[in-house]
Image: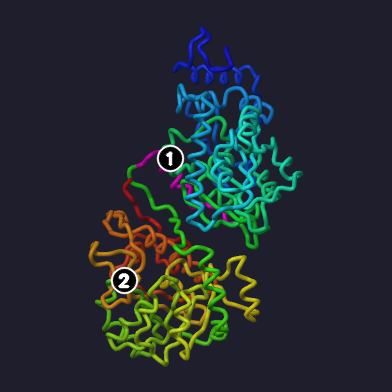
Amino acid sequence: MPSNGNNGNGGGWDKTSPLRYVSQVIEKLEAGIYPTEETKCFCGVEPNDSVIAERDRYLIPHKIVMCENCLLMRANPRMTKEAYAEFYNNEYRKIYDGFPYQEKSEDKDFLFQLAVDKGVELKKFLAKWDVINPKIVVDIGSDKGGTLMPFKDDGAEVYGIEICEDGRAYAEQKGIRCFKTIEEAVEAGIKADLVIMQDIIEHLMDLREMEKVKEILAPKGYLYIYTPGLLAIDPNQAFQNAHTYQFIGATLDYVMEKLGYAEYFLDDHILSLWRHIGPPQFAEERPLIWRKAIFEHLLQQDYRSLPPVRTTCKFSEKDMLCNLDANLKHRIPTIGELTNKYSGPCIIVGGGPSVDGQIDKIKELVDKGHSLIVIERMYPWCYEHGLKPTFVVQLDASEGVEEGFTHIDPDAIHLIGATTNPVVFEVLKGYKQYIFSGVGGAHPDAQPSWEKHGYKKVIIVNTGGSVSLTAMSIAQVLGFRNFHLFGFDLMVPSHDKTYAADIAGESVDRNYVEVEVGEEREKVLTCSSFLAFAQQFFGMTETARRWGMIDSVDIYGESLLTKMFDSCDDNFMNSKSVPTELSIGV
């Protein structure tokens, strides 16, 4: 059979070419020319696998199993390392370029330009996260080197790593130095500001090979990984015999954390950015909660239970660290000075529209002596309704947050996130202020700022991405054990009524979606961030309950949380499970 994809009769490419290479791979597998081997899961636990697929998308024998101990999917058995090396040089490009690109599949210039276009898009993605003009860039699995060209054109020093001889040769013609293995790059002393792994991690024979990547990363370098996330693609197109692993975002996160990488950005497509920070500091948490979502997706069910929702901070790492350094210069005390100074019940007021109907109830609880904790946007709302907050929690770093401080109560204690907009500290000068750290303030690069400004100890609060959740976390630090929660609706009655009246400004624009709650499938209008906050609420509250930090939570008004409570058989505060049963139409 001709190795160049021609039809053997002197003609050019024809539509049967990739199919003939598929047949060739199947024949080699059956004949043992491409031998296979059994595999064990990365997690190291005794195998407990469920079979996901027996053949790949082109019917090549390729069994995919899912480890029931960690949900990572892998090929078992798979071809040996030597067999894969032969396959990549003989058939891989003929099949996986042949089907999508047909007669263009052996046009090296065309394929190179496709990769150049991907490099342009990658640069746009990186710019969103302030990874701009890296000086040294390495692409692992670089093929012909096209992805590196936009970086090279901007003056970066670029290197490829590619096992395929044809790919390395073409890249060298384009002026890109190309190594065969990562070990060669390590020996050359390469330290990259950016390492690219696009469509490569799913091909690795052993995921611990990722430990080698840190050897070519600069101390503050970024690792970009793209791999087709199962939950974001048609499962009929998910599996191919070249893929030794199949990921969802949660299993990639699990693997990377165990290998010492910290997530900077990750979604379920999977587009992701990572930093290497060393061995994990906490016990591993296996992503078993995603099992149901995986099988519902594989079965392509019309209605599915809600998987854990990923959210991303709207502020860049650069901006957060800049704010942090500016704010710490004020050297205001941390909330550590208030730890366990309070007890009993407290009222927490968020900005959902239902709070407008609960004013009398809030006043009743205040009259009983309960402390009143409000988020910064509800500060003017309190003034309008004659309420004096005990505490005001400020987290937002957005422009215009000072609008919440038009009527400052001299008796209120202001609890301020270390990475908030610096204008807040100026506005509150002379008033009672205490600082705390959220995720941004706990960033690995933040420690020098804390030390520079004389902070030897700081309280890190689980903010959950929501000021209301932050207020709950801080209330536990202060010593409160009974919570009355208002305005934490996480749903809206309509697209027009999304906030309480008299709230100070609005947060980010939201794209609302309709979900169904409980067995009755009650329709609720909400958004992705609200769904994430709901899940975080239950997780955070359950953790607090188990650690004996919380006795009760009462939720007032129309709230997604109460609807989720109602869909559970057991009382949440006395149960071992978290209510998560929502359905979403797809």
Query: Residue 233: which quarter of the image?
Result: top left
What residue is disc 1 on? 233
Placement of 46 over or under 369, stated as above or below: above
Specify few, some or many for label 1: CA neighbours under 10 Å numbering under 14, 14-19, or 20 or more. Answer: few
Q: Amino acid at mark 2?
A: Gly
Decide if residue 12 is in sight here.
yes
Placement of 393 over or under 586, stated as above or below: below
Image x and y of residue 335, in percent: 54, 82
Of 100 and 40, the residue lying toward us: 100
What residue is disc 2 on? 352
Image x and y of residue 266, in percent: 50, 53
Give the magenta-colored segment's residue range. 285-301
Query: Residue 140: which quarter of the image?
Result: top right
> Element under label 1?
loop
Q: Amino acid at mark 1?
A: Ile
Q: For the N terminus, which image quadrant?
A: top right
Q: Residue at x 62, y 47 (%)?
A: 137
> Quick one: which residue is furthest to the top in this view?
9
Q: Residue at x 48, y 62 (%)?
A: 576
Is 563 left or right of 266, judged from the image as shown? Answer: left
Q: CA distance from mark 2 to mark 1?
A: 35 Å
> Element under label 2?
loop
Placement of 502 over or under 106, stated as above or below: below
Q: Is label 2 in contact with label 1 (beta carbons under 8 Å)?
A: no
